[in-house]
Image (cartoon, rainbow, N blue to C red):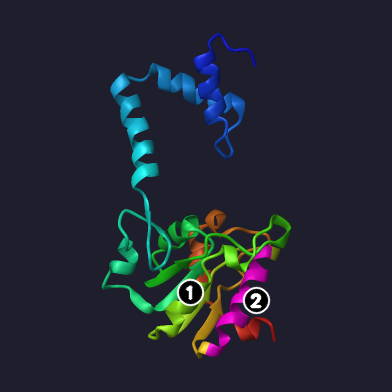
Amino acid sequence: MNFSSKLLEQAVIEFGRLPGVGQKTALRLVLHLLKQPETDVVRFTEALNRLKQEIRYCTTCHNIADHTICEICASHKRDKGLICVVEDTRDVMAIENTNQYQGVYHVLGGLISPMDGVGPSDLQIESLVSRLAAGGVHEIILALSATMEGDTTIFYLYKKLKDFGVQISTIARGIAFGGELEYVDEVTLGRSIATRVPYERSIA
């Protein structure tokens, strides 16, 4: 693609670094911004700068937050004894959109994937163990994607947590193998959480 301006080209290159954004889409986005009032563009860039500079991660569950403790962990309406373990923040948002879960979360920050060089020590697993060791937890829901990496992570977590004497559940497999939670419709995801099953039964 030939550009009439180096500034335009550089902006398109940067937008093209975003996941799922090809060069043509990046060009459309950049040209759209050029047509907007300067105040709108400044507001846009300031929002991105604040996001990078001020975003926090909850010290309890590792979800993205505005403060050291996220709103979910801080809420008195949530069942602190029910922890839903997910891969990342997108999964928290997907589950919250079902309006069928009133517990809290634990964000692993990824899945075990030896092929990608991601091992247990790269994830927020030890902090999950610490939460259980502190007491007060009655159930862990392993709500991970129905993929090889998700199943590997679930099996590892089960071995790590089973001796704490809490119920360990997995979401019902209304989700096709290979499916990721963020792309599952809200009804199916909500039903999968509501009809969760003990993990021991799924490997029996």
Residue 34 position, x and y percent, is: 41, 18
Q: Amino acid at mark 2?
A: Phe
**Residue extent of the magenta highlight:** 149-163
Secondary element under disc 1, as helix, strand or loop, is helix
Mark 2, residue position: 155
Q: Nearer the viewer, residue 179 or 46?
A: 46
* Quadrant holding the N terminus: top right
Q: What secondary structure do most residues of the magenta stretch adopt?
A: helix
**Does the rendering let one see residue 190?**
yes
Q: Nearer the viewer, residue 175 or 45?
A: 45
Secondary element under disc 2, as helix, strand or loop, is helix
Q: Amino acid at mark 1?
A: Leu
* Quadrant holding the C terminus: bottom right
Q: Which residue sits furthest top? A: 4
Q: Nearer the viewer, residue 87 or 10?
A: 10
Packing grade of label 2 (10 A; few <14, some 14-19, many >=20) is some
| Residue in the image at 54% along x and 80% along y | 169
In the depicted structure, whether residue 89 falls above or below residue 21: below
Residue 189 position, x and y percent, is: 52, 64
Residues at circles 2 and 1 in contact by the CB criterion of under 8 Å: no
Q: Which residue sits furthest right? A: 115
Give the Cα separation between the discs numbered 2 and 1: 15 Å
Mark 1, residue position: 128
Q: Which labelled disc corresponds to residue 48?
A: none
